[in-house]
Every structure is written in C-alpha cells, then in structure tokens.
C-alpha cells in the first residue's frame, strides 16, 4: 500500500532561483533591535559573526533531500519543514484539523510562544502528499507514533532529517555541525524567499516564521549576503 502511495505522489517542487549557500568569508555584519519604539542597527561583535544562521542549503540540495525520503510520511515532514517553514515541534504537533486543504493553509496552534498563526503554502505537492498519507483519517495528530502522547518525538524528526541527508549525501553546510538538522530547512526556504526577485518583504517573512519581533527577522534576513554582493559587483562591472 505504501508503494502505491509513493507511485501516486508527484513531488512537483517549484523552487525559486537563488545562488548557493553563504560563503565562509567573514565580512562586517550588523544586528537590529527595537529601542523606545525605534529600530536601532549596530555592528555585530566578532564572536557573533558566522553563526548557524549564516549557513543554508542550496535549492538543488533541498530537492535531492526531499526526493531521498524513505517513506511518504518522511517526505511530508521534510516538505512541511521547508515549504511551511515549520519548527520541529510545530511539525510534530500538527493536527489534521489544522490543515485547510481548500485554501492550502496550515493553522498552527501549538507554537513556540503559544501564539497561533496561519501559514499559506503555495507548493501544491505538500497537500497532495498529505492527502495520500492521511488516507481516511480526519482527526488527531498528523504524524502519529506509539509514544505516550501519540505523536512523533522531536528526536524522531531529528533522525528523519539526519538519516535522509545521509542517504542523499548532503552534509550540513555549517562546519561546526555534523548532521543536518530540521531547523536548517526552515531557515533555507526563508533565505530563498529573500533571494528571489523581488524579495519577500521582511514584515511578511516575520509573520510566516512566527518571530515575535521584526528585529529578529531583520537580524537574520535583512542584510545582503556575500554571494549577492559578489553578483551585484559582477553585474555592475560588466556594464
């Protein structure tokens, strides 16, 4: 039955065109924070440069990763982490009742700060796979297990991402981390959205990611990365 599901599921991944992940060369970086209702920007300290947020996956690696999923369930999880930019706990806490199939939205109720949010997903393959995976189930956790609360654990999701990455031959671009982690999929799609033309607005990205403050989103995604600056220099010099 699982084989029939796999054959019937088409992963029509429509990825935006963006360059590769961030370079390891260190350039001055800045951070933003809100003070007295105003946005303040200051230069980062040296020990704040090249953190985990400076690394993300190429889109072709994301495609390869999703295509290497061992099961329909695993593929659904990977797609939600990427296209939905869900946190690991948000993915494991997703309920069937939270999925708005007609509108292609997820209505998240169990979030980082217990603040519900709705996430639209424009990749139709996400909902096609979810329909196949859920079959006739209409209520309850999307990703069930034999645990006490009946849902997958955070460790299980870590293992799904890590093992699938090994099968796909994809290493974590962060040299300090040995395995690929779920959060990098969320972060990678956010980076890709910021690199498309025109880029997604910071305020919209903040709502999609569920950040409490727009300054958090700006600290990570507002500044130009090295690849983009290099491309702009080449474009200007070729005129």
Image (cartoon, grey):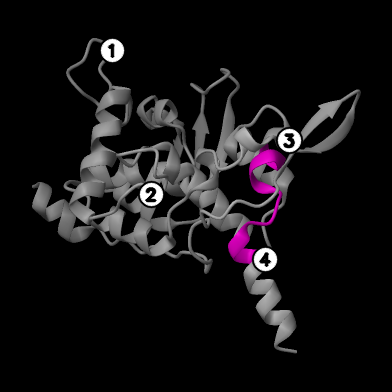
Q: Name the residue under label 4.
A: 229
Q: How crowded is mark 3: few (under 14 residues within 10 Å), some or many (20 or more)?
A: some
Q: Mark 3 points at which residue?
A: 214
Q: How far apart are labels 1 and 3 at the CA level? A: 34 Å
Q: How far apart are labels 1 and 2 at the CA level? A: 25 Å
Element on which disc 1 rests: loop
Q: How crowded is mark 4: few (under 14 residues within 10 Å), some or many (20 or more)?
A: few
Q: In this view, does 56 lie above or below 52?
A: below
Q: Mark 1 points at which residue?
A: 149
Name which of mark 1 and mark 3 comes first in the sequence: 1
Element on which disc 3 rests: helix
What span is colored magenta in the figure?
Answer: 217-229
Q: Where is residue 150 in the image (x, y as percent from the top left)?
A: 25, 17
Name which of mark 3 and mark 4 comes first in the sequence: 3
User: In which quarter of the view is residue 118 placed?
Assistant: top right
Name which of mark 4 and mark 1 comes first in the sequence: 1
- Residue at coordinates 24% horizontally, 33% vertically from top-left? 159
Q: Is residue 182 magenta?
A: no
Element on which disc 2 rests: helix
Task: Decide if residue 73 is on the left or right side of residue 29.
Answer: left
Q: Residues within 10 Å of mark 2 (few under 14, many from 20)?
A: many
- Point out the frontmost of discs 3 and 4: 4
Name which of mark 4 and mark 2 comes first in the sequence: 2
Q: Position of residue 27 (x, y in %)?
A: 66, 52
- Residue at coordinates 34% horizontally, 45% vertically from top-left? 78
Q: How crowded is mark 1: few (under 14 residues within 10 Å), some or many (20 or more)?
A: few
Label count reads 4
Label number found at residue 127: 2
């Amino acid at each position: 039955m699982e084989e029939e599901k796999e054959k019937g599921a088409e992963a029509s991944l429509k990825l935006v065109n963006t360059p590769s992940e961030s370079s390891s060369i260190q350039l001055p970086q800045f951070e933003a924070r809100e003070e007295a209702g105003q946005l303040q920007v200051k230069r980062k300290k040296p020990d704040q440069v090249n953190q985990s947020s400076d690394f993300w996956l190429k889109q072709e690696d994301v495609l390869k990763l999703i295509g290497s999923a061992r099961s329909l369930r695993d593929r659904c999880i990977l797609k939600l982490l990427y296209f939905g930019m869900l946190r690991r706990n948000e993915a494991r806490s997703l309920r069937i009742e939270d999925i708005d199939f007609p509108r292609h939205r997820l209505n998240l109720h169990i979030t980082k700060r217990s603040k519900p949010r709705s996430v639209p997903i424009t990749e139709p393959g996400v909902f096609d796979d979810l329909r196949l995976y859920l079959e006739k189930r209409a209520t309850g956790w999307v990703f069930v297990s034999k645990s006490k609360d009946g849902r997958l654990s955070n460790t299980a999701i870590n293992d799904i991402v890590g093992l699938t990455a090994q099968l796909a031959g994809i290493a974590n671009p962060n040299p300090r981390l040995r395995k690929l982690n779920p959060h990098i999929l969320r972060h990678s799609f956010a980076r890709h959205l910021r690199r498309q033309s025109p880029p997604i607005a910071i305020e919209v990205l903040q709502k999609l990611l569920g950040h409490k403050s727009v300054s958090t989103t700006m600290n990570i995604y507002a500044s130009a990365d090295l690849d983009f600056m290099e491309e702009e220099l080449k474009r200007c010099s070729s005129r």
